[in-house]
Amino acid sequence: MPLPEQRTEEELWLEYRRTGDPAIREAFIKQYAPLVKYVAGKVAMGMPHNVEFDDLVGFGVFGLIDAIDKFDPEKQVKFKTYAVTRIRGAIFDELRSIDWVPRSVRQKTREVEDAIGSLEAQLGRTATDQEIAGSLGMNEEEYIKTIQKISVTSIISIDDVWYSGDENDKVSIIDSIESPSSLNPDVMVEKGEIKRVIIDAINELPDKEKKILVLYYYEDLTLKEIGQVLEVTESRVSQLHTKAILRLRSKLTNIRKGIV
């Protein structure tokens, strides 16, 4: 369905913001429905087989509607960019609510995060796989197998929300993964202290892990495509992605507790 009349999309956004016209809203939903399938497809690639693609699309539609209702065209942000975060967030919110991750995997994830957080707070640097494995009473091979088991939960972890001040001013890790060229001090100040903290934590990651986050969440490449860029296997990219998210979460947890 084409957008109503022959006005520009920008004009329609301004009118919808002013009037809340349901016809314009419906047109935007249909216009951007393919974006929901695209985001759901990316999320589905990291999910176990019992998570249905159609269910993810259904969850994502709620995010699209939320994005349409809350989008402010005067903030100079492209709707597509804004909507992707909302759609992904809605999918993850629903997955969290149905608690699809096995309890044993959730517990192991917390154990690894705690180990990384404690080690890196003590060492004042990034802990190696060998050091993390040792603190968990594992050898390196066992640690890598554990990372593989919990890799799917890391995709949800990156959308966890941090609040800076009040509930209406929230920032997630994924909101903070941007093109490295945009991470200048002025931008950090404008987006608030909590976002600066997240960006600092991202910048402290090992180079390859940081690059994977940027390529996956900002450049929108698949894990397979990232593997081709970095000349490593897709499973290796998945491991590095998981390690990056666990490091980030442990760093941010330490900051919350005032450890670092």
Image (tube, grey):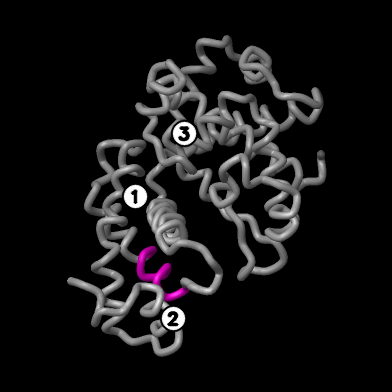
In the image as oriented, which residue stretches furthest toward the bottom? Answer: 19
Q: Residues within 10 Å of mark 1 (few under 14, many from 20)?
A: many
Q: Position of residue 176 (x, y in %)?
A: 60, 49
Above or below, 255 against 23 in this view is above
Q: Residues within 10 Å of mark 3 (few under 14, many from 20)?
A: some
Going 63% across and 32% down the picture, which residue do you hit?
Answer: 247
Q: Nearer the viewer, mark 2 or mark 3?
A: 2
Q: Which mark is residue 14?
A: 2
Above or below, 160 against 181 in this view is below
Boundaries of the magenta span: 63-70
The answer to which of marks 2 and 3 sits earlier in the sequence is: 2
Write down the quadrant of residue 69 in the picture. bottom left
Residue 93 can be seen in this image: no
Secondary structure under tag 3 reads helix
Name the residue beneath numbered marker 3: 105
The amino acid type of the residue labelled 2 equals Leu
Give the spatial CA distance, label 2 vs label 3. Answer: 46 Å
The amino acid type of the residue labelled 1 equals Val
Q: Position of residue 38 (x, y in %)?
A: 30, 49
Above or below, 141 against 197 in this view is above
Going 31% across and 42% down the picture, which residue do you hit?
Answer: 44
Judge whether residue 161 is colored magenta: no
The amino acid type of the residue labelled 3 equals Val
Q: Nearer the viewer, mark 3 or mark 1?
A: 1
Give the spatial CA distance, label 1 vs label 2. Answer: 26 Å
102 or 1, nearer to the observer: 1
Secondary structure under tag 1 reads helix
Q: Position of residue 17 (x, y in %)?
A: 44, 82
Write down the quadrant of residue 102 in the picture. top left
Q: Which mark is residue 39?
A: 1
